Amino acid sequence: MSRPKEKKRVIVGCDLDDVLVAFMPAFIDMARKAGFGPDDDRKPIDWDWSNMGWTREQRDTLWQQLADTKDFWVHAVKPMPQVDSDLVNLLYESTVMYFPTARARAVGGDVAIQSARWLRWNFGILYPTVIVSNEKGPLAAVLKYDYFLDDRPKNCFEVKRARPECQVFLCESSHNQDYETRRECEMLDIPRIAGFNEFAELILEETNV
Ligand SMILES: [Mg+2]
């Protein structure tokens, strides 16, 4: 007797920071506590925090402070306020979902373990597959993503090039509004999307869940 056929589940890659996790506010908060400012509510306009008014030394100090904070990725970050926890769970249960991340090391548990613990505590996902890697393109090819969401343009471009059949989306953020990014997104057919909820709804609709 052959095994009953299971409906093929689509494969989803979903970035963590500034897609599900409010990393930028946590980092800016650290800077304010260190006395580096800013004293207004400006948001970063690029990946290097160039408009935040920090010197290079101050920025290095912040990254060092993050690295020295025990279990930073468990305790120091909160979910993105607009992310719907039910949608996270529904998508997780309806697809094969991976959480690739290029997070920096922080003392305490391994980054993947810290991140998995955070996902468990904040969204109730018991066994999330977190993969820590800077090479999101090769990862996409190996894991065979059907859908991918990230707020960093470079990651979206790499994933699209490594796996053209994947539907790649750029998550809207203050730091990815520049002209070059818009142009390359158009060239590579990468739509911009408001956030995780819209991404999840689109997949659930397309896969008739
Ligand atoms: Mg990110």
Image: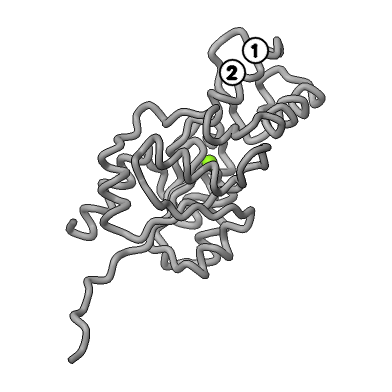
- Where's the N terminus, which quadrant? bottom left
- What kind of residue is marked 1? Lys
Above-or-below relation of 181 to 21:
below
Task: From the viewer's side, name the closer residue of 23 and 1.
Answer: 1
Element class at badge 2: helix
Q: Position of residue 101 (x, y in %)?
A: 55, 48
Report which residue position mark 2 lands on: 29
On screen, 206 above or below 191?
below
Q: Which residue is mark 1?
A: 33
Q: How far across and down, in percent of the image, does residue 22 sit?
A: 48, 30
Is 88 on the left-hand or right-hand side of 98? Answer: left
Within the image, what quadrant is residue 162 found in?
bottom right
Q: Is 60 left or right of 28, judged from the image as shown? A: right
The C terminus, quarter of image: bottom left
Residue with the most extreme top position: 39
Do labels 1 and 2 touch, CB within 8 Å? yes
> Which one is nearer the viewer's eye here, 167 or 7?
7
Describe the element under mark 1 as helix, strand or loop: helix
Q: Which mark is residue 72?
A: none
Looking at the picture, tell me which residue is in the foreground, 127 or 81: 127
Label 1 – label 2 distance at C-alpha: 6 Å
